[in-house]
Image: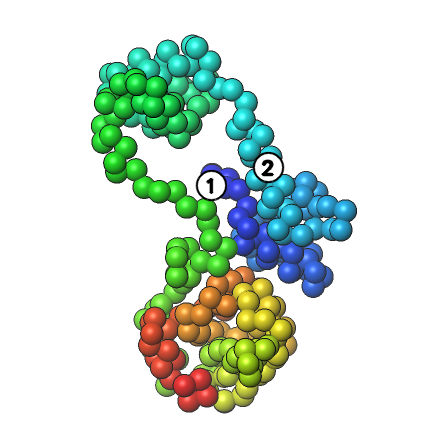
Amino acid sequence: MARYTQLTEGERNQIYVLRKHGYTLKSIARAIGRSAGTVSRELRRNEGERGYRPAQAQRMARERRRRACSHPKMTPEVVSYVEERLRQEWSPEQISGRMKMETGARVSHERIYQHVRADRKAGGSLHLHLRHGQRRRKRRCHPNPNGGGRGQIRNRRDISERPASVRFRTEIGHWEIDTIIGKGHRGAAVTIVDRASRYTLVRSVKRRTADEVTWATISLLTPFALSVRSITADNGKEFAWHELIAGLLEADFYFATPYRSWERGCPCHR
């Protein structure tokens, strides 16, 4: 069974956009890869007086997590258990897992590290028993709704994975997508071209953001859904919701190699 993870801010944005345009709970759940119950619970718990808004939903969820973590867990018994095993050179991860098995107490390894830091500030020596002195612990980052890492698009499929036959333009249904910025950076347009027929679709958007570009793309291609086999884009962040587009259109979505947009090959997008 897959482990449940909290909804990200990006997923909440997607729920908002799809719900705004009349998609059912089941359709939304399928598009973001979640269960319909998860989407229903999200709307029920995080809807405000003005309806469901993603920024507000993210704040409400964050506040609930903060309240849930604010209850004191480091009781004298837990502290004794933790410190005894730290001095035996156990890692905080091992202690957290073993404590849950032996006592049922749930204290995360992060909370144990916090306890060690507090002990060090107070002049204690628990930090000397950590295997790496905390030097190798990586900085934790919040998920980026526009991609997996800084400057990257999450779960992108490289153009090298695209079938070689697409390059020869013998099949209708392989599309290339791009965006055009308006004069003075006011507004933008989404352009989608079929590689074989050169049939072109264009839709203006107010802003070149992931949500607006995604909805414009879905609106443009839905009438041709039966003949959408693949979509290829450059690495612009406006295509960060490529998984949503691919899921709703049941098509493959590929990205050109960074800084090599010419790999897409269509003269219309050079």
Q: Is residue 79 above or below residue 216?
A: above
Q: Residue 247: x and y, percent?
A: 53, 62
Q: Residue 122: x and y, percent?
A: 34, 19
Q: Residue at x 40, y 30 (%)?
A: 110
Q: Is residue 174 left or right of residue 165?
A: right
Crowding near pointer 1: few (<14 within 10 Å), some, many (20+)? Answer: few
Secondary structure beneath dot 2 equals helix
Q: In this rendering, does residue 264 appear at all?
A: yes
Q: In which quadrant of the rendered view does residue 115 lie?
A: top left
Name the residue beneath numbered marker 2.
63
Instruction: Return the residue nearer the eye: 69 or 124.
Output: 124
Q: Is residue 151 above or below residue 67?
A: below
Q: Residue 58: x and y, percent?
A: 59, 46
Q: Residue 201: x and y, percent?
A: 57, 83
Position of the C terminus by quadrant: bottom left
Name the residue beneath numbered marker 1.
2
Q: Is residue 167 left or right of residue 90?
A: right
Question: What is the count of numbered marks?
Answer: 2
**Residue type of the residue flagged with mark 1:** Ala
Q: Residue at x 54, y 26 (%)?
A: 70
Q: Is residue 257 left or right of residue 183?
A: left
Secondary structure beneath dot 1 equals loop
Q: Residue at x 26, y 38 (%)?
A: 136
Q: CA distance from mark 2 to mark 1?
A: 25 Å
Crowding near pointer 2: few (<14 within 10 Å), some, many (20+)? Answer: few
State how the image is colored: rainbow
